[in-house]
């Protein structure tokens, strides 16, 4: 999250929900001047610790051996759903986290680690630490280039995307997840890496039958829950499209907090504690998800 790119891509990446300047926004690039306030808002929302419209789910999940696979773009993106990962891991679900890129551009003022291989290596270790704190499996690191080589042109970008697609498909085949979680279409911040992970996971998911029921969900923020003084406009989704609402407990949150502390290259302890205190005051946590592609009844009209 707390990252400042030193090498913005030359490719414009579609609609951005803030100023479309990768040097000044996003999980990967917002500046220090807005970082504290934004972090609070972002994590607050990511945990769903917002004005809850939650009620008990009408349909309870089946029990038995289950596998959940979360796929995100950068090391620390899992923070958006980390309490949910901890929750299901504690319930006996085998939880995997796949991270598409190496985060090599996530420089921060406090860590002072230069962009490149050294930062990528640090962030890989941080991801492992976070997974351990959450009680999930060691992370699956695709090792793709942060920003997917967009700045180098279409060819390198296309190669990165093809590699990502192959790796996602391989994971589906080898892990045989029952549930897959990823970014929503906006990627919350509009970051192109987030959007592309969403697109490719969806693409692979709906490309074939997987031999058993598999559920795809997109993590999302309900519209109307952003604070009015938000330093940047995150993409949100009308709550009517977010019927999947997962309760988050104090225990889930504590594990998430411990996992955030692993990302030392991205957060200071003070920042994390500030976020924690903010959230502790409103523990009616709910994580919101939109169902992704799914089979439905055939019909012969668009209306
Ligand atoms: Zn990210």
Image (tube, grey):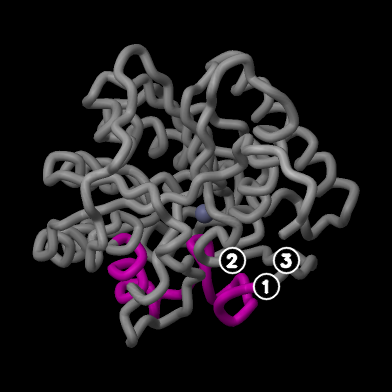
Residue 32 lies in the magenta stretch: yes
Q: Are marks 2 and 3 in contact (CB under 8 Å)?
A: yes
Residues under labels 1 and 3: Cα distance? Answer: 7 Å
SS state under label 3:
loop
Residue 19 lies in the magenta stretch: yes
Closer to us: 102 or 17: 17
Residue 186 position within the rendered picture, expressed as x and y whole percent measured from the top left: 58, 62
* Image-based side of 157 in relation to 174, left or right: right
Closer to us: 210 or 92: 210
Which residue is at 63% across, 55% downward?
195
Q: Name the residue under label 1.
A: 15
Residue 170 position within the rendered picture, expressed as x and y whole percent measured from the top left: 66, 20
Which numbered disc covers residue 190?
2
Residue 28 position within the rendered picture, expressed as x and y whole percent measured from the top left: 52, 61
SS state under label 2:
loop
Which residue is at 50% across, 59% downward?
107
From this view, report whether residue 163 is shown above or below residue 245: above
Figure disc tally = 3
* Image-based side of 102 in relation to 239, left or right: right
Quarter containing the C terminus: bottom right
Q: Name the residue under label 3.
A: 13
């Amino acid at each position: 999250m707390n990252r400042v790119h030193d090498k913005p891509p030359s490719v414009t990446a579609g609609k951005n929900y803030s100023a479309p300047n990768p040097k000044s926004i996003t999980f990967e690039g917002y500046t220090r001047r807005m970082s504290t306030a934004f972090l609070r808002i972002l994590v607050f929302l990511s945990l769903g610790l917002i004005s809850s419209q939650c009620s008990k789910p009408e349909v309870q999940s089946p029990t038995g051996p289950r596998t959940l696979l979360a796929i995100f773009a950068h090391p620390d993106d899992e923070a958006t759903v980390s309490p949910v990962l901890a929750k299901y891991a504690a319930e006996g679900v085998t939880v995997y986290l796949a991270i598409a890129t190496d985060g090599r551009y996530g420089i921060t003022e406090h860590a002072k680690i230069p962009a490149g291989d050294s930062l990528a290596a640090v962030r890989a270790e941080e991801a492992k630490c976070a997974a351990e704190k959450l009680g999930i499996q060691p992370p699956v690191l695709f090792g793709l280039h942060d920003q997917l080589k967009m700045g180098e042109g279409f060819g390198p970008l296309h190669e990165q995307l093809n590699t990502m697609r192959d790796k996602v498909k391989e994971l589906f085949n080898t892990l045989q997840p029952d549930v897959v979680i990823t970014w929503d279409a906006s990627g919350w911040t509009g970051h192109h890496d987030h959007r592309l992970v969403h697109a490719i996971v969806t693409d692979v998911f709906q490309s074939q039958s997987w031999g058993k029921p598999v559920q795809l969900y997109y993590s999302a923020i309900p519209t109307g829950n952003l604070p009015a003084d938000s330093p940047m406009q995150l993409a949100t989704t009308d709550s009517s499209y977010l019927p999947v609402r997962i309760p988050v407990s104090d225990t889930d949150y504590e594990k998430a907090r411990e996992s955030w502390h692993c990302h030392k290259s991205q957060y200071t302890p003070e920042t994390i504690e500030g976020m924690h205190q903010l959230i502790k005051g409103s523990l009616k946590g709910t994580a919101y998800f939109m169902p992704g592609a799914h089979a439905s009844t055939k019909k012969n009209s668009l209306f």
